[in-house]
Amino acid sequence: MGMADTTPAHAVERLNSIRESIDNIDAALVHLLAERFKFTQSVGVLKADAGMPPSDPEREKVQIRRLRALAAESHLDPAFAEKFLNFIVAEVIHHHERIASGDEIVP
């Protein structure tokens, strides 16, 4: 027995509409992350060419403070925003390490 069998049609219609909006936002997030990683790949190449370390702890601290403040202003849990940024930064550092070692990064 599916949800439509026991739920009023208007609720199912509204749920589907909301889910469509969520799907659109998910697609936008993926596209934004892809664009972000294009730029961080460029940073990784510049750092490798200049002999700079893959990680920049001071910038990471600044970015965490900035993102936590943005999250609070947007009524998003700052701790969640920090976890999200830490996840992205860890992946970026991994890419920078691979670039520095001469490994090819697959987009």
Image (cartoon, rainbow, N blue to C red):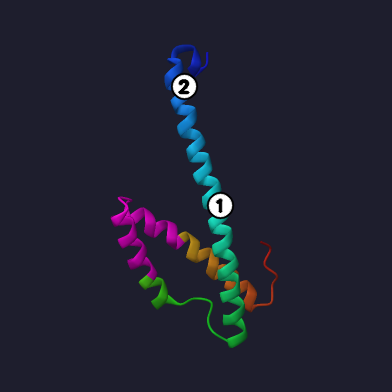
Q: Which residues are magenta?
A: 63-86
SS label for mark 1? helix
User: Is 74 colored magenta in this rendering?
Assistant: yes
Q: Which image quarter: residue 71? A: bottom left
The amino acid beneath tag 1 is Val
Residue 105 drawn above or below residue 19: below
Q: Residue furthest bottom?
A: 50
Query: How many other residues sit within 10 Å of disc 1, few (<14), some (14-19) or many (≥20)?
Result: few
Residue 29 on image: x %, y % = 51, 51
Residue at coordinates 55% horizontally, 70% vertically from top-left? 40
Q: Nearer the viewer, residue 44 or 75?
A: 75
Q: Secondary structure at mark 2?
A: helix
Residue 12 shows which numbered tag? 2
Residue found at x 43% / y 61%: 85
Task: Please name whichever residue, 89 or 23, is drawn nearer the observer in this view of the structure.
Answer: 23
Chain-order first, disc 1 or disc 2:
2
Q: Which mark is residue 30?
A: 1
Q: Main secondary structure of the magenta part?
A: helix
Q: Which image quarter: residue 94? A: bottom right
Give the residue displayed 48% in from the left and 39% down from the top: 22
Amino acid carrying mark 2 in the image = Val
Q: Residue at coordinates 59% horizontally, 81% vertically from top-left?
A: 46
Q: Position of residue 98 (x, y in %)?
A: 63, 72
Q: Which mark is residue 11?
A: none
Whether residue 65 sits left or right of residue 59 in the image: it is: left
